[in-house]
Amino acid sequence: MKKIYFLHIPKTGGTSINSFFRVHFSENQYLDHFENQKEISNSFLKNDSFYLSGHVPYPRIKKELDCILNLQRIVFLRDPYDHLVSHISWVYNLWSNQTRLKQHPKEVQDLSCYLNKFNFSSERDLELLVDEMPIYGIATFDNRQSRYLSDPPDSLSFNQEFLELSLKNLFEFEEIGILEHINESVRIICKSLQISNFSIPHKNKSKYKVNHSTSIISEVLYPFYKYDLKLYENAMGKLRFVSKFKNLEKKDLD
């Protein structure tokens, strides 16, 4: 029996991860996007086996999770710059489909409108975009992966103190996957969970991109991913992900 909690940080391959685990649990043992629920029932968490996933910062549910025996925590991280550009692209391109845009909260609609006022090939426009970012934009784009692990106030820019809490919480997760190595990550996780089938579907690939091929964009947007970069590098280094994968590949993937 397995009890799994997956911290679904947006734009880190979570839809694929949810789809993979969906086939391994019955309907009453599987719950994704629990942020849409008023609450998680005690009966669900008392199941001998369950899969729980959602876009909810880890500190908001940590207390409940700490009470569950034999729980396996899983999180995926993504290259921070690619993650930021993917998230900006998603919000930016909502504006081109007004019907779809109106299906989202007003804050998302306003943020999409805000982004579309700027020319992403102009260094000056990009600097204004960062300097004048509204509060909801800060909460959405400012070191978003780290924010999901420490949950600072939306109005505050991310800082070193928040990063230290993010790192502390990150290493409470038994399994940390890397989107750039999603197949390898899933194989490692499956080995740990004793799941034999580790074929993973690739879902929800973004079709629309903000052009980020120039160094100007990466330099101007750096404040929005510099702490995520530290989180990502720290995770890769301390967990020795590549070495772990090479060892697994040698023993189990022939």
Image (cartoon, rainbow, N blue to C red):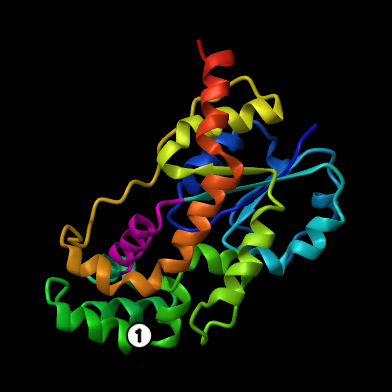
Residue 151 placement (x, y as % from top left): 61, 73
The reply, left or right, for residue 198 in relation to residue 80 is right
Which residue: 40% across, 67% down? Answer: 225
As for residue 70 lying within the magenta part, the answer is no
Residue 137 placement (x, y as % from top left): 40, 79
Q: Secondary structure at mark 1?
A: loop
Q: Quadrant of residue 163?
A: bottom right
The reply, left or right, for residue 160 in relation to residue 220 is right
Which residue: 27% across, 82% down? Answer: 129
Q: Quadrant of residue 83?
A: bottom left
Residue 126 placement (x, y as % from top left): 22, 78
Q: Residues within 10 Å of mark 1 (few under 14, many from 20)?
A: some
Identify the residue at the far top of this view. Answer: 254
Q: Which residues are magenta?
A: 78-91
Q: Is residue 38 visible?
A: no
The reply, left or right, for residue 185 in relation to residue 92 is right
As for residue 86 lying within the magenta part, the answer is yes
Residue 50 placement (x, y as % from top left): 74, 42
Q: Amino acid at mark 1?
A: Met
Which residue: 44% across, 44% down? Answer: 179
On screen, residue 211 above or below 43: below
Count of numbered badges drawn on the protein: 1
Which residue: 70% across, 24% down? Answer: 194
Residue topped by disc 1: 133
Quarter of the image where the N terminus is located: top right
Camera-side residue of 227 and 89 = 227
On screen, residue 243 above or below 59: above
* Most common secondary structure along the magenta stretch: helix
Q: Is residue 69 visible?
A: yes
